[in-house]
Amino acid sequence: MTMSLRRRFPLVLCLLPAPVLAGPPEVVTTYADIALATYGDSLSTAQALRRAVGDLVADPSPETLAAARQAWTAARVPYQQSEVFRFGNPIVDDWEGRVNAWPLDEGLIDYVAEGTPSTEDNELAQLNVIANPVLELGSETVDAATITPHIIRALHEAGGIEANVASGYHAIEFLLWGQDLNGTGPGAGSRPHTDFMAGAGCTNGNCDRRAQYLVAATDLLVSDLWEMTDNWETDGPARAAVTADPQAGLRAMLTGMGSLSYGEQAGERMKLGLMLNDPEEEHDCFSDQTHLSHYHDGLGIQNVYLGRYVRVDGSEVAGPSLSGLVAEADAGVDQALQADLAATMVALTALRDKAEAGMAYDQMLAPGNQEGAAIIQAGVDGLVKQAKSIERAVAALGLDGIAFEGSDSLDDPNAVFQ
C-alpha cells in the first residue's frame, strides 16, 4: 500500500523552475480546477469504498473486511489533500463537518468497551443507535427500525454536541476497525468480520443493523462528495465565489494554506496530542493511519501553492500558480516558501515512513518516547515555519483581511492544562 501511495504522489523536494507568469484570474481558475479534481477523486474513491462495503455485508469474511479497510484507506488519500480548501471557503466550511468531523463519541453509534471516556455532559454518548430501533433524543422519539441516511443525518451532532459524530469518514472508520484499545501500545482496532455476519455467527449482537449503518453511512458519504464536487464544476457556486472576485479567491487560497498549516495541523492535530501524550487526540485513531492523514494534508497545501495536483489515475492538473504571483512580487519570498513547503514534506515523509515501518503514530505519542516525539515535533516545526512564510507571501501580494486559525497548543500552551 505505502509504495503505491508514494508512486502515485511523488514528493516535490526541490525548487521548481520559474513558473509561467499569469494574473490572479488565471491563478484562481487553477485553484478551482484542482479543487474539482481533488473532490472528484474523493468521490470516485468513496464509490469504490461503497462497493467494497457492499461486498463485506453481502459476504462477511476476513478478506472482504480487509478489502473494505483498504478501500477506506485509499479514499482518504485525495480527501485529505482537499482539506486545504477549508477555512477560506464558506461553502466548504459549512459542509466539512458532515464528512470529516472528529473526535467522536463512538458509543453514539455502536457498542464500546466499558469505561470508554466520552465528552462531558453528553447524554447521547452511549446511545448505541445500532442496538436500539427506537431512540430517545431529549423529548423526541425517533423510529430507527431501519437505519437510513436520513436517520444518520438527523443524529449527526445531535443536541448541538460536536462529538456526536454520526456520519463521515471517521464513523465509517469506527465501524470497519472498531475501537483501538491499545492506548500508546502497538495495534489498531480489531473489529472481527463476524460483527457483520447474520444468524448464529454474529458477534456482539445486532449484526444486521450494524451492516445497515455501515451501508447508509457510506451512501451518505458518496452523496455528500457528489454535492461538493458539483460545487466546483464550471457553474458551481464554490468556483464562482473564488473566480468572480480573484482577489477574494487569493485570500481564500492563502487563508486555507495558513490555517491548515498552523492552527489545525501543527496545533490541534499534532502539538496538542504531543503535549498531552494522548492517543485520543490522534486523527485516524481507529485505523492507526494518522501518519497518512498528516502527510496528505501537507501535500494538499503544497499542491495549492504550486498549482498542481496528481490525480489518483496518475494524470496531473496544473496551471498558473500562486507561486508565480508571489515570485513576480518578491522572488525571495517565493523561493523561501517553496523551500519551507518542501522541508515540511521531508518531515512528514519521515513521520509517514516511521509509522509504516512499525512505530504507529499513537506509539510516537507515548510518554518517554523521545524518538517519536522528535519525529512529530519536526513536522510541527516545519508547518509553523511554512505558516510564517505564507504570511510573508500575503504581505508580498499586498493582501489584507487574512487571519490564520490559531491553537492554544501553539499560542498559549499553559491554557491546555487548565
Image (spheres, helix red, strand yellow):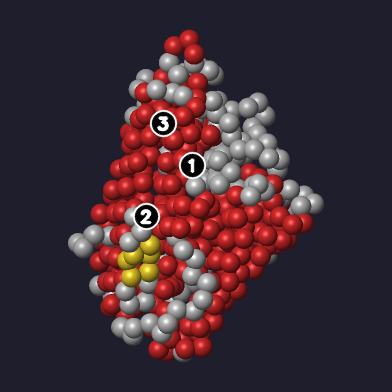
The answer to whether the residues at label 2 and label 3 have Cβ atoms under 8 Å apart is no
How far apart are the alpha carbons under marks 1 and 3?
Answer: 11 Å
* Quadrant housing residue 246: bottom left
Picture residue at 61% right of the left edge, 69% below the top: 382
How far apart are the alpha carbons under marks 1 and 2?
Answer: 21 Å
Picture residue at 37% right of the left edge, 29% below the top: 55
Q: Give the amino acid at mark 1.
A: His
Picture residue at 25% right of the left edge, 66% below the top: 240
Measured as percent of width and height from the top left, residue 314 is found at 36, 59
With respect to residue 387, does 35 lie above or below? above
Which type of secondary structure does the marked residue at label 1 adopt? helix
Find disc 1 in the rendering and name its residue.
Answer: 170
Q: Earlier in the sequence, mark 1 or mark 2?
A: 1
Find disc 2 in the rendering and name its residue.
Answer: 312
Specify the quadrant that holds the C terminus: bottom right
Find disc 3 in the rendering and name its residue.
Answer: 214
Which type of secondary structure does the marked residue at label 3 adopt? helix
Instruction: Return the residue nearer the eye: 247 or 220.
Output: 220
In-image side of 180 versus 124 (left or right): right
With respect to residue 112, does 266 lie above or below? below
